[in-house]
């Protein structure tokens, strides 16, 4: 169950990408402003459809970066490790790019992944994390945790986490930054 993976490429994708590669080859930087499909404004053509999809007005929707870029931006803003509080808690087998982004942010702060990344494993012979184990770990390690990052829906197992309870436990330990779920 890896529902958040890309899946097969839509057949028309290659045709549209080839058009943009040709445009790049022939126009270079001018591809940002020249038709067909100026790159600088390409998101404007689909905002209305995205707004309809999520039940919003086009003025309330913005298309942004990919998940990993957004995660880096969030961690840059919220991961402010100190000598005492430097760990990032996440579930084991998190989405691979989430895992790599966390490793990268830890290293950027001059810390080691071994000391600062706290990957929570299920109990022996179990696939999913138990809520009581998550809460116990937050209580036990909370004074050293700077960020709790659970995805909401565990990518590998499909486990749905109780984010409200995890967030409340984090807040009880003071100064927690909870990264909200990315997968719905």
Image: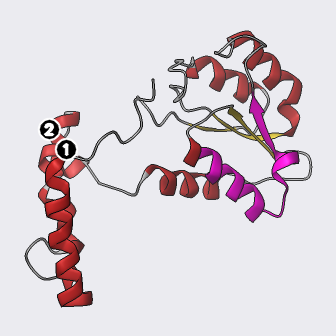
Q: Is residue 152 rendered to the left or right of residue 176?
A: left
Is the residue 109 above or below the residue 78 in the image? below
Q: Quadrant of residue 18?
A: bottom left
Give the residue pinned by disc 1: 50
State the residue lying farthest toward the left: 36
Is 88 located above or below residue 14 in the figure? above
Can residue 4 be seen by looking at this rendering? yes
Q: Which residues are magenta?
A: 98-120
Does 67 appear above or below 164? below
How dense is the environment of label 2, judged by Cα within 10 Å: few (below 14), some, or many (20 and up)?
A: few
Q: Assign the N terminus to one quadrant of the image.
A: top left
> Answer yes or no: do the residues labelled 1 and 2 have beta carbons within 8 Å?
yes
Task: Estimate the x, y position of residue 138 in percent, counting from the top left.
Answer: 79, 25
In the image, 130 versus 176, the foreground residue is: 130
Residue 27 falls left or right of residue 86: left
Q: Position of residue 118 (x, y in %)?
A: 79, 37
Residues 161 and 2: in front is: 2
Q: Residue 163: x percent and y percent? A: 57, 22
Q: Is residue 127 magenta?
A: no
**Dot label at residue 52:** 2
100 is within the stretch colored magenta: yes
């Amino acid at each position: 169950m890896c529902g958040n993976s890309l899946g097969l490429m839509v057949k028309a994708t290659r045709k549209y990408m080839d058009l943009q590669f040709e445009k790049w080859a022939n126009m270079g930087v001018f591809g940002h402003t020249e038709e067909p499909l100026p790159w600088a404004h390409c998101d404007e053509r689909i905002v209305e459809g995205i707004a309809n999809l999520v039940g919003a007005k086009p003025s309330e929707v913005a298309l942004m970066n990919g998940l990993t870029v957004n995660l880096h931006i969030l961690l840059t803003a919220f991961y402010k490790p100190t000598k005492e509080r430097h760990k990032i808690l996440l579930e084991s087998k998190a989405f691979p790019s989430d895992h790599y982004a966390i490793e990268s942010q830890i290293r950027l702060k001059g810390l080691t992944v071994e000391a600062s990344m706290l990957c929570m494993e299920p109990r022996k012979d179990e696939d999913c994390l138990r809520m009581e184990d998550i809460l116990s770990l937050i209580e036990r390690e909370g004074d050293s945790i700077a960020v709790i990052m659970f995805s909401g829906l565990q990518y590998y197992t499909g486990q749905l986490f109780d984010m409200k309870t995890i967030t409340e436990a984090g807040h009880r330990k003071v100064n927690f930054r909870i990264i909200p779920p990315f997968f719905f």
